[in-house]
Amino acid sequence: MTNEFHQEITEQIRKFRLERIEPLLEKDDHEARFRKEIFNELGELGFTGITIPEEFGGAGLTYTDFCVFLEELSKTSVPYAVTVSVSTMVQSILNKFGTQEQKEKYLPELTSGKEIGAFALSESGSGSDASSLKTTAKESGDSYVINGSKLWITSGGVAKTYIVMARTSGEGSKGVSAFIVRDGDPGFEYGKNESKMGWRTSPTRELLFQNCTIPKDRLIGNMNEGMKVALSALDAGRITIGAISVGLAQRALDESISYSLSREQFKQKIFDFQGLQFMMSDMATETEASRLLVYHAAELLDKGRPNPKISSMAKLKASDTAMSVTTDAVQILGGVGYTTEYPVERLMRDAKVLQIVEGTNQIQRVVIARQLRKSFN
Amino acid sequence: MWYFSEEEKALQELCRDFAQNELAPKAEHHDNEESFNIEAFKKMGEIGLLGITADPKYGGSGLGALAATIVMEELGKACPASTLSYLAHTILCVNNIQNNANEEQKQKYLPKLITGEWIGCMGMSEADFGSDAVGIQTRAKLNGDHYSINGSKMWITNAQYSDIAYVYTRTGDEKKNLTTFILEKDKNQFEVGKPIHKMGMRASPTGELIFKDAIVPLENRVGEEGDSVYHMMKNLEIERITIAGISLGVARACTEQSIKYAQERKQFGKEIGNFQLIQKMIAEMSTETDMMAHFLYGVAKEYDMGNKGPAIAAKVKLALPKMATKIALDAIQLHGGYGYSREFPVERLMRDNKLNEIGAGTNEVMIMIIAKDLLKELKPKKV
């Protein structure tokens, strides 16, 4: 799975995260502070548009390469990894469905990391049931007018380019279209900033549209085919959350091993207690199994054979593993693990939402079951 | 429970009202601010909760582990962190003084601790001695008519707010030569270090107690030199039973919240309670919560009847906090995005409960205690 190029990415990101992000992290997590300059610097290093073609400023690399990057960055900061992952997803959508003009206009600022992209699908009443969304977009002369609101939008407020899903006719998935909305567009404002358990350095915000008026050339793809646009990003989205989960789990495991090798109780290293050895062996096995599943899913996607069942399994398994491994890491570090002085309590808080975003793990099971049924039809 | 007395049922009612009126509305605020709800704590004194197990002649209620557990569950449903501070005061400080101190000491300390005029804590753990508590290194040295104490205690619940600390120290090199003292803040018998920032239980202050040549008169010693291990062991069981009560409260609150949410939240055109996956989650949460309640209250009742033992208390302490963390994680999952936000209480309940798998003896130490009891006949060999 690893080659020299991947080792280079890993080394570069390792150095960056330890020097630039890690020292600020405890404080930033406490204050829920996002630093745009860190994102910009990741852009300067060439990591904010990894899978986008070079003609638009991207790196033209594969999802496997992207996963290597996300896994390493997530060892320090899931929130920054998520910011990059979502911004890259927005770029993939534009690259796949956008017109040449749209690509030339919006992609370079995103691939270079000068701007951040965000994706707005969820609403207060439609989370898992995404296609029941209520935000509307109506044609009016040479414009579209958007009304409604979006909830839990990653990078809301710090992003410049938003892909907003809105209802353009009827009910259900067939009446939804995708639009580009830019920070500062008339009638577009930010609502409440969510106070969250984890992912605290990644802003999550409500978007409000009150007669938000945008030009006609902001429609992405065809009218009423928005859900197709959204669904196209699903496999990649699930795989990237999987890679982030693996990085998080690996960090929790590394912290557990190094702590238990240094901490003594009852006159021996606590690593020498079989109870802890068994815990860490299970943690390591689950993490490795998740990693293999994630990279398998990424490889299928890279080969042009995305497999929704495998992508869902990768997201499900890796995020469940991240949750259990980080929980065990807090347990192994004991009292200090519960304090903010050590990173593991933050890792545990950051893990939980991996089971909720990009389709809750309940939804992943529904998807897997659907594929299982299909294979017997 | 069928065996709750009228008095215990009334106590449950009282605590339920108190928790809903005084703790629940402020729980999110104090969690966010990492601040202590001292007003509510003082009111616990006014309504008679702070000396639940203490003798009525000092102002206590003279009740047992069962009653104390009822309080923990009810308060724990609303705010586990405030309940942890309550536990540190009532079970770790007041109950220890009640059981081990002499008459003068009881008269001196208990009434003010029970009214809430004074706040108490207990100092056992040190930075290098957590699970391995008997190894503690804080030293008390006899110098004529007083002891001088040096060292520090770590992860002390209520440290910053305590007037009184019930503290274990080392008085000799032999492993079990440990001695207990009651120390007073006003007399500079301890100092307080910097507050410790935590994942959960943020509304319960945690800090360090520091002793720098603290001068402590003989009259502050509890029992004789070398009595600490006996004191520790005697109190550990009620400590573990009652902290499990907080986890029962967490499980109860998470289950109730989830049932409510499953009936309100609509996705795919129907309440999510219609989906079998959600039904499975709440059915299991509720089943496990009922198991927890019956196990815990049964053990607490037996404890009050004199049927005690370290292994059964360890089993309660191993089972309940672990199950409550799982239930709370499921409750967040069931609430989806809302569950992860601080608007709903379930993420706080999960963060708070995780501590119960670590404090008052980690899960791993519980396993050691249980296994030691089960394998009494086995000769220990290194593996």
Image: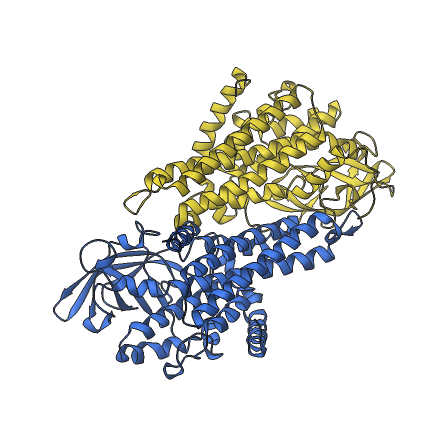
Chain colours: A blue, B yellow
Horizontal arrangement in the rendering, residue A274 relative to residue B27 (left or right): right
Q: Is residue B123 visible?
A: no
| Residue B84 drawn above or below residue A143 | above
Q: Residue at x 47, y 79 (%)?
A: A44
Q: Quadrant of residue B303?
A: top right
Q: Nearest the camera: A285 or B132?
A: A285
Residue A349 appears in the figure: yes
Q: Position of residue A6 (x, y in %)?
A: 55, 75
Residue B200, how many percent across, how many down? 54, 47
What residue is at 55 percent from the left and 24 percent from the top?
B48
B377 and B55: which is toward the camera: B377
Report whether A113 appears left or right of A25.
left
> A295 or B307, which is in the foreground?
A295
Q: Nearer the viewer, residue B193 or B245?
A: B245
Among all residues in the image, which is located at the extreme front?
A377
* Vertical position of residue B320 compared to residue B354: above or below: above
